[in-house]
Image (spheres, grey):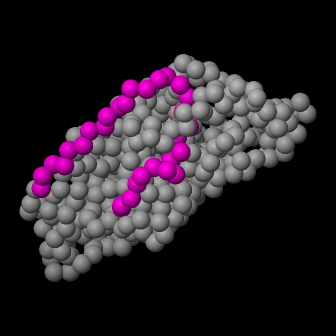
Amino acid sequence: MPFYQKRGEIPTKRHTQFRDDTSNLYWEELISRKGFSHMYTNVYHVHPPTSVEAVGELKKYNLKAVDQTHRHHHIRTANVESDGDAISSRIPLFFNSDVVISKAHVKESMKSLYRNGNADEVLFIHTGSGIFKSNFGNMALTAGDYLVIPRGVIWQIDVKEDMRILVTESSSPIETPTRYRNKFGQLLEHSPFSERDICTPDFVGPVDDSPMDVEVKLRHGIQTYGYQHHPFDIVGWDGYYFPYIFNINDFMPITGKIHQPPPVHQTFQANGFVICSFVPRPFDYHDQSVPAPYAHSNVDSDEIIYYVEGNFMSRKGIDEQSISYHPMGLPHGPQPGKIEESLGAKETNELAVMIDTFKPLNMTEAALNVDDEDYPYSWIES
């Protein structure tokens, strides 16, 4: 996140002696992105962050695409067979070289720690609540939260209420949209959200020292490492690299006299895709405006929309937790009757998350298993 944060105790200068009350040196660790040319944070440990005492087996995994007819899809993710903690419950639905999109029905707290060494993550908390615990500190999770976790963060989630989570894994850093930032990284005055809306970790400090397993996700599997000391032994940190939360309900929508295109709803960007937030808002106010969107041939993008709640103005037969998948190469748009139904409407109560990718997505068998095969014909007038 492009603003500075400081927690706990740190020395006046980096890379200088920093000791505890008994004159033991703390262990400084630099966590940096893109070598030494991007965001970074310095953290200070009680114990060496390198103290691995056991290396487990690599648990391999392989994302497998299924052959499919090129068509529109309606994926009923509420019916996905998913159970476990925030990692074991993940069911991949779509993927390409830039992004993996999964659904997780989380009922259990995590017993071990987790670090994604292969991707940045955005966890959209649809329902439920819990506590996100990390080496940077803790944050409460509630419905509507986008939890942004840069790769390399060590974390676990304790569940308070069963959670439904839309998981996005990115091969590149998750960022706020460039057009909403000035050259210093500050969100601009016309941005639909500001730094005031960003929640950052509450510092906890070192936990009780004990050996701890950390599961690290790599390109081809998950490797378990046994650490001699608990990694949550940080006495202080400062920098620009840390996990954070932005709640979708804090997104202030941009509206217009006529229908505004989806980019005004953009919330995050990464290489190869964007994430947008559709939130309750007034409709267009031109006296001849058509609130429902026009038909669209998005010739360079695949479009995923995850429906959270409310009545989406252009769709019918869509439930909460549904995903509409409109691939490039086909036009999509409002279904019959939805344009006329929107005329004269003053506002919408829809809440949805859109992911547009700039490379074609692959579908998994898990997605096809909950696909509505009649959806491609839902534009036929009856």
Indicate the quadrant where residue 108 lies.
bottom left
Indicate the quadrant where residue 375 lies.
top right
Q: Is residue 129 above or below residue 273?
A: below
Find out whether residue 303 is within the magenta segment: no
Q: Residue at x 89, y 30 (%)?
A: 288
> 185 or 76: nearer the eye?
76
> 138 or 182: nearer the eye?
138
Q: Is residue 20 left or right of residue 120?
A: left
Q: Residue at x 25, y 48 (%)?
A: 217
Expressed as whole percent of the image width and height from the top left, the position of residue 279 reads 67, 48
Indicate the quadrant where residue 299 lies.
top right
Q: Is residue 168 visible?
A: yes
Q: Is residue 176 visible?
A: no
Q: Main secondary structure of the magenta part?
A: loop
Q: Residue at x 26, y 65 (%)?
A: 112
Image quarter hosting the C terminus:
top right
Q: Is residue 261 above or below residue 216?
A: above
